[in-house]
Structure formats: structure tokens, C-alpha cells
Image (tube, rainbow, N blue to C red):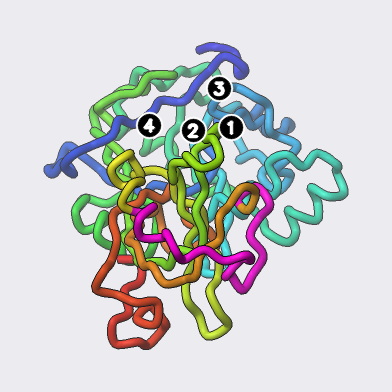
Amino acid sequence: MPAPADLRPMLAAPGEHVPAGAGWRHEVKWDGVRALAFTTGDEGGVELRSRNGNRITEAWPELATPPPGPGLVVDGEIIALNERGLPDFRVLAERIHVRRASAVARHAAATPATFMAFDLLRVGDEDLTGLPLAERRARLEGLDLGASGWQVPAQYDDGEMLLEATRQQGLEGIVSKRLDSTYRPGERSAAWLKFAHRHRGSYVVGGWRPQTGSRPGSERLAALLVGEPTADGLRYRGRVGSGIGPKQSRLLAELVAGLGRADSPFADEVPRVDAAGTHWVEPLLVVDVDTHGVGYERLRQPSYQGVRGDLVPADLLPGAAGEAGAR
């Protein structure tokens, strides 16, 4: 097996249809940081390496207690929960680049991370990568993880059921794995298939940004700044550029023409990186946006889907008869 700095995790291929049958097991797709954990035995510690082989041990002190027993190599995902109790990469993002020990300790105490261990690659001198997943999984479940801050996530027989359950709960999706699959470091294999959810919601346009490098007077609309109507005003939810091609750009430009205003219509502050170069508009136009996951302050990987001519901003207020939130 390669040295820690050279070992790369096995990757899942995008799937089209959730596989069925006794030869597959299905797991939650976690919204976290993929990591390989290396332990050196009972008296040693834990070394964590990112997907690209970078050492990230110091960022996660709460995960540094190794399970008892011989040295291990474990594949998994570092996760942390948001205020809604859901795994949320944003919570981790605040910690990823923190290196000062006192700051790391404060983050670890305030938002402790968990290592979701889903594969076992080595025990002592025994390389397990050539064994079927079913055997690796059984060995993993036999480890004593009580004091380590690690967990073995559940597996499910019914992938379609799990996919629907994760959609309803606002989770990222699922990964389906063949029980007879060997572990292929660094490869993207069809023996592991990933299914990520996209959620569609309706949002109000509060501004638009031109294509970078556009000449004044010939600016092409390249992105929308959108928000969610609330009792406290229009709350900023993010910038949407994906899905806006030349045809969509021309249509949207016609629709926002004449709606310009001097200041932001959003009740909260728009991040400077989004506000720079933005043309503000009266918040009258409603559009549909596909996004990855629900319940986040900012839309994740948003994609423009079209104009909702049948809705006005008041229809999107909580409790309104025409309410059209993420779905």
C-alpha cells in the first residue's frame, strides 16, 4: 500500500438509476470533507490526509484519539452538523484553514466534528483493499470506536427508499456500492455510484451582473442575484450564473430593463464579492433555481431554470397561498 501522502481514496461515479438487488448496499452521501485516517497502534495517534494527500490532522483535534488495536487505514468523511442538525460543509469550511492551536480548540469545542468511517483498507500489516467490500465492512464494524470520535454509518438494502428519505430530509444524496467490489485507490469506479439531490425553488431577482469584460452599453447579463421574501424583507440567497446561456440572457435582460434602481433591494448585506459590478433592480421578477441541498443560508451550486410568470414575490412569503419554496 502506498505511503499516506501518496494514497488516494476510491471515488464514486455518477449514477443514472439506483441499483437494486442483494449485491448492493446504500449509504448516505455526507456533505463533508473526504479523509483517509492512518493510525499507528494503541500508543500512537491519528494522521488525517485529505483527498489530495495533504495533511489535515491539526485541524481536527477531536478526531485524534485512535481506536484501540493495531495500526489502521480507514476511509471516511469528516462532518459537522449545522443548527438544523444536518451535515453542512459550511460549518467545516470555517475550520479548514485555521491553524492557530487556540482557534482550532475553540472551533472543536463549539462545533465538534465526527469522522464517518465507511471503509477499512488496512489492519496492522494486512492490506484489505483486495477483499470484497462486504468483508472490509464486517471488519470495520468490529472495531471499537467508542472513544475516538469516529462512527460507522448505517448501510441500507433499499436504495430507492434511502434516496427519497435523504431528499425529504434535505441531505446531499446517497452512494450505492457493490458488496463484491474491491477497493481501487485513486480510481473512479462504477462499483460505487453516487446520486446527489437537486432541489428547485422560486426566488426573487434583486440584481444582475454582466459578463466579465463586457463593454459599457453592450453588457451581457451573465448572473442573477436572488433572494427569499421574508417578513423582515428580501433576504439574500446567492448569485446564479449556471444555466444562463445567450438565449436566457437576452430574455432576462428584456425583463429587467426598466427595473433598475440605485441601491440594493436586499434587507441584509450582500457580500462584496457578489455586489461588485451588480446592477440593482426592483424586486419584482420571480425565477426558478435548482440548487444542491436545502436549508442553507446561501444556495449551493445553483442553476437557473426559468422565469415564473405565474408568481409574484408576495406568493413566496411563508404561508402565502402560492408559496413555492425549495422542492
Q: Amino acid at mark 4?
A: Arg
Label 2 crowd (10 A; few <14 / some 14-19 / many >=20): many
Decide which of tag 4 and tag 1 comes sooner along the chain.
1
Q: CA distance from mark 2 to mark 3?
A: 15 Å
Number of numbered discs on residues: 4
Disc assigned to residue 37: 1
Residue 199's x, y, as percent?
33, 58
Q: CA distance from mark 4 to mark 2?
A: 11 Å
The residue positioned farthest toward the front in the image shown: 217
Decide which of tag 2 and tag 1 comes sooner along the chain.
1
Q: Is residue 149 visible?
A: no
Quadrant of the drawing holding the C terminus: bottom left
Element under label 3?
loop
Marks 2 & 1, CB-CB < 8 Å contact: yes
Query: Is 15 left, or right, of 98 in this rendering?
Result: left
Residue 163 is inside the magenta segment: no
Q: Amino acid at mark 2?
A: Asp
Q: Which residues are magenta?
A: 252-274
Decide which of tag 3 and tag 4 comes sooner along the chain.
3
Residue 8's x, y, as percent?
50, 21
Q: Which residue is mark 4?
A: 136
Query: Is 77 left, or right, of 195 in this rendering?
Result: right
Question: Closer to the observer: label 2 or label 3?
Answer: 2
Residue that appears at 41% across and 25% down: 10
Q: CA distance from mark 4 to mark 1?
A: 15 Å
Q: CA distance from mark 3 to mark 4?
A: 14 Å
Q: CA distance from mark 3 to mark 1?
A: 14 Å
